[in-house]
Image (spheres, rainbow, N blue to C red):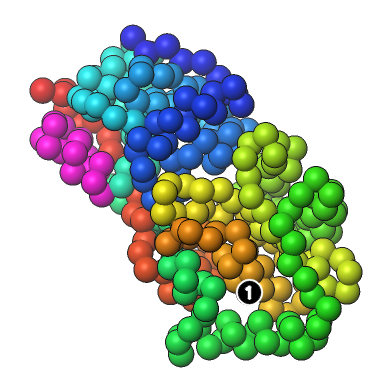
Amino acid sequence: MLSFHPLSLADKSWIDRHVFEENSRSADFNFGNMFLWDGRYRQMVADDDRHLVTLCCAYEHPVFPFPIGCGDLAPVLADMRDYAAANGFPLVIKGLEERHVALVNALFPGCFDCTEDRDYADYLYSADKLISLAGKKLHGKRNHINAFKKSWPDWTFETISQQNIDECWKMNEQWEQENAAFLNGSLLREKAAIRCAFDHFFEEGLTGGLIRAGGRVIAYTMGRPLNSETFVVHYEKALDGYRGAYQMINQQFAQHCCEGFAYINREDDTGKEGLRKAKLSYYPVELVKKYEVCLAQELL
């Protein structure tokens, strides 16, 4: 039987090992997103030496994210089935990539019902394209950046450090004031996750960048390596009244903090129309699709 305990920062090393073994482009599979959003998902974790098994307790009934790692998947799925049955809830697994769905169906044909969850597909971009913004399709992004540079010729980019991180938090508080009318539901949950990111920025291994204009921080972003070729961006904020600030922090962070990575994952849009439009406007090279599977009949 699986033995779970609450997620904590002490779990980072062994979870990172399984993340490295999985080598996924999905933003779901990294310790950072798990830890930063634990206040929302209330996660329990178990390590069977082959896979990371996670239980999320924030839904109507507990659900499992896909178990990542190495080795035979069949015994792990059987353990998850047994745990769910013993605790009186259905076996539901979230966050599967297409390759995971194929693997589950090959191991247990006809046993799972599968549904795509478009709202949680990750947006994957070419790092070079986010830096160069080359081509007609991204002409508008270049215009915004040129407008910013013209309006704020003293602008500078800095990496987030012990010396400037408090300024980023103060800027984030101002951003919250500017967007107070929209701070409900998912944005309130994001607020808690961002506070966690600032509180544990250095011990959690985050990398961040900021833009100054007129001597003050007006935009920041942060993320981490996802695998050997992909960097994931967790958060990006810019103040109102600075045309091109979002385009600047996006481009400058890719240039200065994502060196050596072929791709940048800018996570999902959670079904928000405006956010989806903004992410599509950068023309991703791929959508990392996510699926949910539910046990429909007993595993053979």
Q: Position of residue 169 (x, y in %)?
A: 80, 51
Q: Position of residue 225 (x, y in %)?
A: 51, 48
Query: Eyeballing the image, is 13 above or below 223?
Result: above
Q: Quadrant for the N terminus, please.
A: top left
Q: Position of residue 20 (x, y in %)?
A: 40, 37
> What residue sits 56% from the left and 55% below the top?
233
> What residue sits 42% from the left and 49% below the top?
228
Find disc 1 in the rendering and name its residue. 247
Q: Magenta segment range?
A: 98-114
Q: Quadrant for the C terminus, please.
A: top left
Residue 136 shows in this picture: yes
> What residue sits 35% from the left and 49% below the top?
290
Q: What is the residue that sits farthest to the front in this orientation?
A: 260
Decide: few, some or many residues near mark 1? Use Cα within 10 Å; few <14, some 14-19, many ≥20. many
Q: Is residue 103 left or right of residue 84?
A: left
Q: Is residue 65 left or right of residue 36?
A: left
Magenta residue check for 289: no
Secondary structure of the residue carrying numbered label 1: helix
